[in-house]
Amino acid sequence: MLFCRTVTSRSIAMQANNPAPAPGFSNTGYAPGNQPPYGHPQYAAGNFYGTPAAGPYAYQAQPMGNPSGAAVPPIQNQPSGTIWMPIPPPIPNCPPGLEYLTQIDQILIHQQIELLEIFIGLESNNKYEIKNSLGQRVYFAAEDTDCCTRNCCGPARPFTIKIMDNLGHEVIRLERPLRCSSCFFPCCLQEIEIQAPPGTPVGYVVQNWHPCLPKFTIQDEKKMDVLKINGPCVICSCCEDVNFEVKSLDEVSNVGRISKQWSGFLKEAFTDADNFGVSFPMDLDVKMKAVMLGACFLIDFMFFESIGDSQQRAGVWQ
């Protein structure tokens, strides 16, 4: 009887020191007493830490958390099933809310499907989820444009897009004025202003005139040129991704990419809800990361906002 009690006590102690992993995850590869520390990400079985994530913009996951040890406020108003990226600690000389961008080198933008547009054809304000490569929501973006402007001006409409963090604070604002985008009007081409926080410009994206290619320049808050964006001559998103390359000013070195991802025939044909990926160097200035995010929204409205490929712009000459 004493022997049985001793064995049972040892079994209970071993189970307490080696708890069962969460459903769908595995602690394989971690010996007892060497489990991943609290806050360290657990990966599905067969996908250990250090293995690149799946997808065209895969990169090695970066540990996230709050190294300072300060208490992190709880996430407010988190929808059921939504996983938010952990709140990073404040960083000196970084606009509030942009700390998230210092920890990632890729963002994924998913436009939400609006049923009202599908059934009655009226354009509604666009809404977007902005996630990191781990599927954690970083920001939520919402267009703020009146009904008359949306349905009269269509994809060429001026807009204000407000980007909120997981506490509901507006951290980035995008302002697009009413402009032309055709190569036949070189004096009034597209541009967008990026503000972070709202009211404080951190950069601009301006369209450059070219008879065939969609070209843009990324500028800082002083309107000094920083980077270039070059798109394909014929913009066709049928069954493949459309890539806009972000280059250095001399257009020799590739710095990043804005990619419109193919979403499937039904979604592409009957909705204007698009998926984008934006990749940039990890050490890129956080303000320029925010400006590249704004460039993605401008490209979306210019070339991919119409429903169905038959109405999609194929180039800057249209």
Image (spheres, helix red, strand yellow):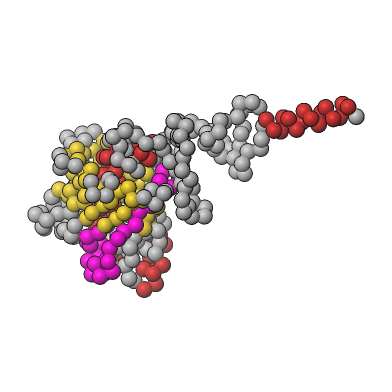
Could you tell me if residue 309 is visible in this image?
no
Residue furthest to the bottom in view is 120
Q: Quadrant of the C terminus?
A: bottom left
Q: Give the range drawn in magenta.
A: 130-159
Q: In this view, does 287 lie to the left or right of 178?
A: right
In the rendered image, residue 193, in percent from the top left (x then y), is placed at 21, 50
In the rendered image, residue 297, in percent from the top left (x then y), is placed at 29, 52
Residue at figure coordinates x 36%, y 39% from the top left: 99
In the rendered image, residue 98, in percent from the top left (x then y), is placed at 33, 41
Q: Is residue 292 left or right of residue 19?
A: left
Does 160 appear in magenta? no
- Residue closer to the observer: 269 or 123: 123
- Residue closer to the observer: 302 or 233: 302
Q: In which quarter of the image is residue 303?
A: bottom left
Residue at figure coordinates x 83%, y 27% from the top left: 6
Q: Is residue 307 above or below residue 131?
A: below
- Residue closer to the observer: 17 or 266: 17
Could you tell me if residue 255 is visible in this image?
yes
Number of numbered discs: 0
In the rendered image, residue 268, in percent from the top left (x then y), is placed at 37, 60
Does 151 appear in magenta? yes
Q: Quadrant of residue 25?
A: top right
